[in-house]
Image (cartoon, grey):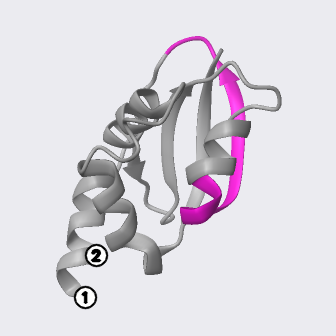
Amino acid sequence: MIYHVQARFRADTAAEFLTKLTDGTISAQRPDGAELVASMERAIVNAEGETEWSELCYCEPPLAHERATVLDLHFDDIRTEPIEAYARYEGQAFMEYLEELVSKE
């Protein structure tokens, strides 16, 4: 099932998260690493400062494995809603946002 995900990013983890997303750490995670990286590449930061993305997941509850291994380390207030297909949302690209945060450190 595909989910619309909304969450608040923990900015103090930006450098660690960007490194894990780009050095192969997360993409090597099985079974969901590649999808998690692709989801973060689709993600945006909306006008309210929340991160939004769409993600394929077969866990019950939704994103259980992703949350246990990655998401709960970097996001708060994670909410999911089933949707029919991958979606794009309006806002700043999340990866760009991460890079900006890291460059300010």
Instruction: Give the class, few, some or many, for how many residues have Cα within 10 Å of label 2's Cα (few <14, many ≥20).
Output: some
- Would you name the residue on which mark 1 appears? 105
Marks 2 & 1, CB-CB < 8 Å contact? yes
- Identify the image quadrant of residue 43: top left
Main secondary structure of the magenta stretch? strand
Residue 55, image x and y in percent? 53, 28
Q: Is residue 9 visible?
A: yes
Magenta stretch, residue numbers: 71-85
Determine the residue positioned at 52% across, 72% down.
10
Q: Is residue 88 visible?
A: no
Q: Which mark is residue 93?
A: none
* Secondary element at tag 1: loop
Residue placed furthest toward the bottom: 105
Q: Nearer the viewer, residue 52 or 28?
A: 28
Residue 90, image x and y in percent? 37, 43
- Would you name the residue on which mark 2 appears? 101
Determine the residue positioned at 25% across, 88% down.
105
Asked if residue 52 lies left or right of residue 1, the reply is: left
Determine the residue positioned at 24% across, 50% down.
22
- Identify the image quadrant of residue 77: bottom right
Rendered position, 48 above or below 70: below
